[in-house]
Image: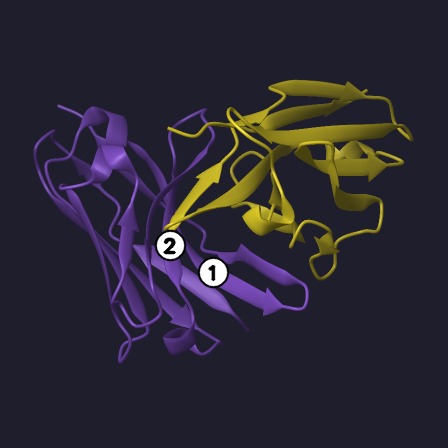
């Protein structure tokens, strides 16, 4: 059973930069996994931030960017703002119709 | 306006059944794969099931295989999730999501999301 790994929690100062990662328990993440990233605040449905590894969804500020760093997918927030405090999830396509979410990262901005 | 609206969530006892529905609007339903994603209280997102645009292929997470059935009625632009033999651990908010695709660059992702419907399994 493939597990998609994310940091459980992260903290960043306002205006700072943070890199959240999305890895595999076995193997490397590649563009063929079509990494996408979602932001969720309490009580709300998730919102798409990034798809196709590094494409920003419509209306997403350019302080959010996606990439592959080493053997993981990464979400970088440059110039973090208070309303970036949320849960962030990555999603990977594993083939054979199976998709897997990471466990999520709770981001605190303080 | 692209929209997904779920319904059917309820409080049920373990072992009982429930059917969730998701009505789509604002896009061509017949060309998109669709999925169900759930979120247990205080927990992360979990992909549950997916179905091809034409309903010919269906996929499930292991814990629901044999108990849940995903289906669609393209004439009604509606996605379904039949949930049988429900367990306490099936409790959560169930989201209907559209699979979006791009060719340049190649990508597949979930967007948009419905607002979710709450399923509570409890004795």
Q: Position of residue A51 (x, y in %)?
A: 64, 53
Q: Position of residue B78 (x, y in %)?
A: 30, 68
Q: CA distance from mark 2 to mark 1?
A: 7 Å
| Residue situated in front as seen by the camera: B30 or A79 | B30
Residue on which the image places disc 1: B99
Q: Position of residue B7 (x, y in %)?
A: 30, 55
Q: Are marks 2 and 1 in contact (CB under 8 Å)?
A: yes
Q: Position of residue A54 (x, y in %)?
A: 73, 51
Q: Earlier in the sequence, mark 2 or mark 1?
A: 2
Q: Is residue A22 left or right of residue B39?
A: right
Q: Which mark is residue B35?
A: 2
Query: Are dots 2 and 1 on a single chain?
Result: yes
Residue B25 figure quarter: bottom left
Helix, strand, or loop for circle 2? strand
Residue A10 figure quarter: top right
Q: Chain of mark 1?
A: B
Q: Residues within 10 Å of mark 1 (few under 14, many from 20)?
A: many
Q: Chain of mark 2?
A: B
Q: Which chain is purple?
A: B
Helix, strand, or loop for circle 1? strand
The structure residue drawn at horizontal position 45% and vertical position 51%, both measured from the top left corner, is B115
The structure residue drawn at horizontal position 27% and vertical position 56%, both measured from the top left corner, is B58
Q: Which chain is yellow?
A: A
The structure residue drawn at horizontal position 81% and vertical position 51%, both measured from the top left corner, is A61
Task: Indicate whether A17 appears above or below A60.
Answer: above
| Residue situated in front as seen by the camera: A18 or A87 | A18
Q: Which mark is residue A63?
A: none
Name the quadrant of the N terminus of chain B.
Answer: bottom right
């Amino acid at each position: 059973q493939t597990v998609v790994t994310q940091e459980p929690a992260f903290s960043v100062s306002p205006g700072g930069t943070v890199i959240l990662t999305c890895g595999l328990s076995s193997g490397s993440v590649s563009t063929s996994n079509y990494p996408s990233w979602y932001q969720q605040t309490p009580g709300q449905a998730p919102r798409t931030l990034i798809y196709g590894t590094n494409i920003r969804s419509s209306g997403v500020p350019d302080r959010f960017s996606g990439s592959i760093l080493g053997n993981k997918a990464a979400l970088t927030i440059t110039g973090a703002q208070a309303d970036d405090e949320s849960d962030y999830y990555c999603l990977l396509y594993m083939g054979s119709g199976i998709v897997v979410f990471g466990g999520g990262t709770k981001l605190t901005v303080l | 306006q692209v929209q997904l609206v779920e319904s059917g969530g309820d409080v049920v006892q373990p072992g009982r059944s429930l059917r969730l529905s998701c009505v789509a609007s604002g896009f061509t339903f017949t060309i998109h794969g669709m999925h169900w994603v759930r979120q247990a209280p205080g927990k992360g997102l979990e992909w549950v099931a997916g179905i091809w645009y034409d309903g010919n292929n269906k996929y499930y997470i292991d814990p629901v295989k044999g108990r849940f059935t995903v289906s669609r009625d393209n004439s009604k632009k509606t996605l379904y999730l039949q949930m049988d033999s429900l367990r306490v651990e099936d409790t959560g908010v169930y989201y209907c999501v559209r699979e979006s695709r791009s060719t340049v660059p190649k990508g597949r992702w979930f967007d948009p999301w419905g607002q979710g419907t709450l399923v509570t399994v409890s004795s």
